[in-house]
Amino acid sequence: MKKSFLTLVFGSAIFLAACGGDDTATNGETAEIDGKNVVQQSCATCHGGQLQGGSAPALNQLGAKYSEEEILDIILNGKDRMPPGIVKGEKAEAAAEYLSTLK
């Protein structure tokens, strides 16, 4: 009985350790979020695959019009027909950083 209980506890610990991954790189640092990928996954449906515009305005020169902070504000709070919070947290920050480089 003790042996099977210990086996169950040990097996559960291994299983939980394998499932408990996080967003860290192999060297212990946090993995960087790729803003371009976030934009392609979250924005291209409305703004076009090349961000040229579609059912929503073009984003391919957004950095010429808005600062990174202004873009982040739009992502988080919405503007005109764009709803707020489609992307949140670090992903929103990465997307704003990337979009601010498009000029």
Image (spheres, grey):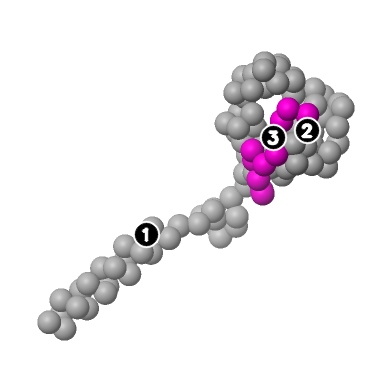
Q: CA distance from mark 1 to mark 3?
A: 37 Å
Q: Which residue is mark 2?
A: 79
The span shown in magenta is: 80-90
* Foreground: disc 1 or disc 2: 2
- Magenta stretch: includes residue 81: yes
Q: Which circle's residue, 1 or 2, is located before the other in the chain? A: 1
Amino acid residing under circle 2: Lys
Residue found 64% across the figure and 38% down from its top? 86
Q: Which circle's residue, 1 or 3, is located before the other in the chain? A: 1
Residue found 71% across the figure and 30% down from its top? 82
- Magenta stretch: includes residue 4: no
User: Relative to residue 22, is residue 66 drawn left or right?
Assistant: right
Q: In this rendering, is residue 22 above or below 7?
A: above
Q: In this rendering, is residue 68 above or below 24?
A: above
Q: Which residue is mark 3?
A: 83
Residue found 69% across the figure and 34% down from its top? 83
Amino acid residing under circle 1: Ala
